[in-house]
Image (cartoon, rainbow, N blue to C red):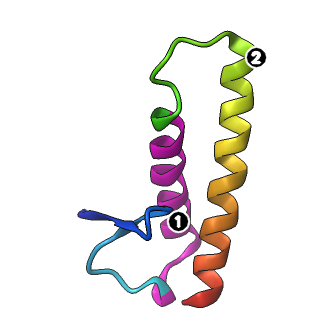
Amino acid sequence: MTYNQFDGKMIECVGTDPSRYTSTNWYCVFLVNLIDEFMANIINVFHDSVYKTLFVQALNDKKTVILEAEKNN
């Protein structure tokens, strides 16, 4: 699979048709974006509580972006 940054907010799969995505496809898009967002924010060493905060923030940010993309497609 080839991935592409979408407006700097979301990684999308190149050459796919989101209107034909199943739940499994959206889970994959969500997971790839969640990992990307999380890894981009853990360059420095943080305490456990900060990791949890970053993870929750990344989870919520990506959920919002992907749900909006799903509505637009």
Please tell me whether residue 59 belongs to the stretch shown in magenta.
no
Question: Residue shown at 45%/23% (left/top)?
Answer: 43
Question: Residue shown at 62%/67% (left/top)?
Answer: 65
Q: Is residue 28 above or below residue 40?
A: below
Percent across and percent down for residue 9 are 50, 62
- Mark 1 Cα within 10 Å, few/some/many (few <14, many 20+)? few
Q: Secondary structure at mark 2?
A: helix
Q: Secondary structure at mark 1?
A: helix
**Pointer 1: what residue?**
24
Q: What quarter of the picture does the N terminus occupy?
A: bottom left
Percent across and percent down for residue 47 are 67, 9
**Pointer 2: what residue?**
49
Question: Residue shown at 44%/70% (left/top)?
Answer: 7
The magenta stretch spans which residues? 19-38
Number of numbered discs present?
A: 2
Question: Residue shown at 69%/12% (left/top)?
Answer: 48
- Mark 2 Cα within 10 Å, few/some/many (few <14, many 20+)? few
Q: Main secondary structure of the magenta part?
A: helix
Percent across and percent down for residue 45 are 53, 11
Q: Is residue 40 above or below residue 51?
A: below
